[in-house]
Image (cartoon, rainbow, N blue to C red):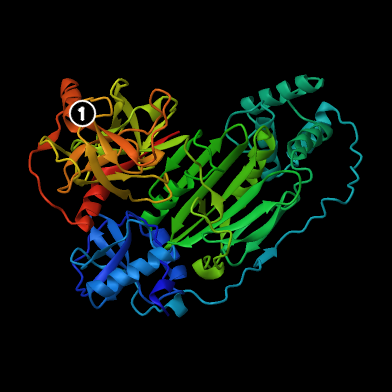
Amino acid sequence: MTRSAIWVSALALTLAAQGAVAQVSGTWIQLEAQPTQTAADTRVRVYAQRSEDVAGFALGRSWYAIVAGPYPDRAAATDALRDLRQAGLAPGDAFLTNGERFGDQFWPVAGATPAASAPETAPQSPRVVTITTPDASAPQTAPQIPEESLQDARVSEQALSQAQKEQLQTALGWAGFYDAAVDGAFGRGTRSAMEAWQLAQGFTPTGVLTTAQRAQLVGAYNAVLDGMNLQLVRDTAAGIEVMIPTGAVSFTGYEPPFARYGAKGDVPAQVLLISQEGDQNRLFGLYEILQTLKIFPPDGERTRKDASFEIAGTNAEVQSYVTAQLADGQIKGFALVWPAGDSARFDRLRAEMQASFAVTEGVLDPAIARPDEDQAIDLVAGLQIRKPKASRTGFYIDDGGRVLTDAAALASCDEIMIDGSHTATATLVDEALGIAVLTPDDRLSPQSVAAFQTQVPRIQTEIAVAGFPYGGVLVTPTLTFGRLADIRGLNGEDTIKRLTLTAQAGDAGGPVFDNGGAVLGMLLPNTPRGGQVLPPDVSFLLDAGTIVTALSAAGIATETTDTLAFMPPETLTLRAAESTVLVSCW
């Protein structure tokens, strides 16, 4: 296999412990560094089918490197990196490294080979057994129920089973007349609820339901499930047994960790069965990932416990619910996604699924589904992730995790996120300078903070801006290299500097580094100036001195330096990754 055929990618899940330094030699190509490992274990197994040169190492501080190699020398690695980039198989910020920072190796797993880890053929046909098959379409003839006196009603009520009594209380609650415990005990609360229901239906309020009235109440309770064809289904691949509305959804395929049941008619519904091996870290990672999906809106209750979680969400389009539990090294659960505005049916289906959910033997094999042309970076197991209104770049300015970024993109934000997982508030906005300071709601401890350069830089020296030009497509910042064209703006402004650099909208707010890794300033957005559209390779930065002065006036201390030095590109790339963040506006 040629070097250009290597295809490596990784996602990840934070581990709690740090590993010892691994003994590695040679030159490596570091393609990505990620803060999580669970998805990496799955994706690397898939991509390892294409090359035996894929490896993964811990970097420390809960980061993990995805690498290709090793190569015998730097020249061979340089040639391989060039081939990978030309083939579109390596990101633009991939770089060479000697592996001195590598810790424990997490891929390949001991004893694993690409062939064994990801078989060439993977079954995709459903492994589903229908346990109950009621014929929902068959006409049902309602039995004739004779009229009853109050005394007859008391007698027929006494013949009810415990389950039937509890069902009556549940139906009264669903109808809005009962909000106490469902215990089958017909005390004062239940009798009052029965009287209220009888009054609402035009019956004499006796507090004792006749056989006909009980049938009407339970019939209304079950009417919302008409056409849903609820069936107890056992998915043997996922190791789950649960009631599924087979009148609305049918099996569509496996996308680990999901067995997917999609809409089969006019109702845009989905059911997901969740099944994977894992531990608490993986459970918590799944909890975070699910909240990025479009089908789980951000408005709703979230509950996470040591071995389980629940997520509810609703917006103008959908209402959804997902739950999962960890037991014996396996994570299993289900999700129900239903159209908004049909809450009565949604609540009933959710209750039926919760009551019937049971774990059977087996867990979904990560290799059960092969990669295809429908893969996309904005999909998780085939499901669309939510996208922000706008994405910009920011960088840490102090040890508490405060971030400096472009102010223009924050005007319409309902919520601001740092690196997609930390909510933040704009605590300082200077519209005249175009800067904003974001303070995370929970204190962060960045690996590195900006050191603002106080020395006047030399014109035509090399600079680099760290940014996220593609939003969240790449999870680490991209370095774009250029030159310092002038230490003033086009009209002689002292507060800005002109750059020869082609930047994109997502780069705005990013740090502009000099050769030594010090920050010369913040990249400004490329907006038309005075009606003029400038050439694409003309960009501007807000001067470090201006930034430091503004932050100092606001009581924010910053780190400065007057040292002019040189830093290799690979070291600068690592520095940028430690201090640069993605800022998302939702």
The residue labelled by disc 1 is: 547
Q: Quadrant of residue 571?
A: bottom left
The percent position of residue 433, horizontal first and vertical second, equals 28, 23
The percent position of residue 529, horizontal first and vertical second, equals 38, 26
Question: Which quadrant: the N terminus?
Answer: bottom left
Towards the viewer: 32 or 320: 32
Asked whether, in this view, residue 141 is left or right of residue 13, the answer is: right
The percent position of residue 530, horizontal first and vertical second, equals 39, 22
Asked whether, in this view, residue 581 is left or right of residue 314, the answer is: left
Towards the viewer: 6 or 526: 526
**Mark 1 crowdedness (10 Å alpha carbons): few <14, some 14-19, many ≥20:** many
Towards the viewer: 216 or 438: 438
The amino acid pointed to by label 1 is Ile
Residue at 32% across, 54% down: 35
Residue at 64% across, 62% down: 234
Q: Quadrant of residue 487?
A: top left
Above or below, 570 relative to 522: below
Towards the viewer: 572 or 194: 572
Above or below, 177 relative to 385: above
Q: Secondary structure at mark 1?
A: helix
Question: From where the camera sits, is residue 21 visible?
Answer: yes
The percent position of residue 98, horizontal first and vertical second, equals 20, 68
